[in-house]
Image (tube, rainbow, N blue to C red):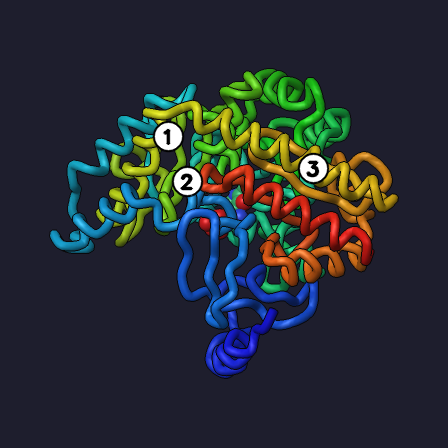
Amino acid sequence: MIYQRSSALFKDAQKVIPGGVNSPVRAFKAVGGDPIFVKEAKGAYLYDEDGNRLIDYINSWGPMILGHAHPPVVNAVVEKAKKGTSFGMPTEIETQIAELAVAMVPNIDKIRFVNSGTEACMSAVRLARGYTQKDKIIKFAGCYHGHSDSFLIQAGSGAVTFGSPNSPGVTQGTAKDTLLARYNDLEHVEGIINSNKDEISCIIIEPVAGNMGCIPPAKGFLEGLRSLCDTHNILLIFDEVMTGFRLAKGGAQEVLGVDADIVTFGKVIGGGLPVGAFAAREEIMNHLAPLGPVYQAGTLSGNPLAMAAGLAMLTELNTNQDIFKSIADKTEYLHKGIAEALDKHNITYTINRLGSMISVHFAEDAVIDFDTAANGNNDTFKKFFHGMLENGVYIAPSAFETWFITEALTYKDLDETILAVSKVAKTL
Ligand code: PMP
């Protein structure tokens, strides 16, 4: 494939945008080469500036669960835009999407909308600290909760892709309040809690990790966290930015049967527009301004275009809940196909999957936490990534990411992808 125009555009972009991108994971730093510039996208496909068609497994890193330019979502945005794009005053649609979200997700009475997953997680932690009157938080190595200071301690996704899991600019003062635990290691968490008695406000976790590749929780792990939180008066925050409205209408809480105290959202909830949200029981949410003392705000929060996209998206998912099973089935089909293709060529790999989240690790041992994810062979991944691209399939340009399956992918697309894996496996 030819990427001449993309490369030229990247050159121009680098002169005026740091690294040529507005979010680091978009650069191909981990895999080498120039990033691809998108011209447009429809359904399961991206069309780039050179006229290539790519089957898309990133899907804007999760939001486009029904495919790109999904007509009900696009129409809702276009119609709203005609009536004004921002007011900084309340609008009815904010209540409509809030009512729907609260009806779909377990254990939440109230929800507040923000503009990104980062804001949602940052605000959720502030709320937990304000509510419990304690300062420290526990996060897990390899989990990513956005780029706010407290989370850039052994973070996953781009932070680890670029080898800077602890970012300069995060002060010692902030870092000391973030305690790091091993994913899927309950004893480790218990030890941390015991050595920080009465100081921990919350545990924040991706209930299915997606930012060190996909890592599902081990049996009993989330249940164990729930019980530790209950015993020690700690709030359990599920970061459902990836899993929310993807694994089921009620997200990971519903699928895994574990209750969280605060839930954060992003990605799907905004239908492809900049939206995040955090939600909890009424007694917790009432601590937020203007009702309570915990301050949180936003000029563009609840923006009408964003709410229109999100409402159209959630309405469709709520009306047709078979979608969740349908995308999980497609993911299982893809899993089997990829495994067969890699087996045929004696490639060492581990595939992790839960619902419509899946990742291929070029690792021998089970991938259950950050250390085992980091053991994967990155050189093999690089070859795999470029091989797939050459065959018209776009996966995330880093081994520390999940593939997102959408309802727009047909079984023919999946077969084309599996065929690509077969061809690439020969060269690994
Ligand atoms: N939490 C999780 C689990 C995420 O995957 C992400 C983004 N990939 C975020 C939070 C941050 O969201 P945003 O990029 O919208 O700020």
* Viewer-proximal residue among 237 and 30: 30
Question: Is 401 placed left or right of 86 in the picture?
Answer: right
State the residue at coordinates (48%, 33%). 246
Circle 1 sits on which residue? 317
Residue 271 visible, this angle = yes
Find residue 170 and report its horizontal and vertical position in percent.
59, 58
* Viewer-proximal residue among 276 and 243: 243
Q: Which mark is residue 337?
A: 3
As shown in the figure, which amino acid type bears the numbered disc 1? Leu
Residue 267 visible, this angle = no
Task: Check whether the beta carbons of the residues at disc 3 and disc 2 lie within 8 A of each other.
Answer: no
The secondary structure type at the circle numbered 1 is: helix
Q: Quadrant of the N terminus?
A: bottom right
Mark 3 vs mark 2: give the one in front. 3
Find residue 107 and report its horizontal and vertical position in percent.
42, 20
Task: Check whether the beta carbons of the residues at disc 1 and disc 2 lie within 8 A of each other.
Answer: yes
State the residue at coordinates (44%, 44%). 63
Circle 2 sits on which residue? 66
Displayed quadrant of residue 27? bottom right
> How many circles with numbers are drawn on the protein?
3
> Which label's residue is closer to the chain start, 1 or 3?
1
Label 1, ligand 1: CB separation under 8 Å: no
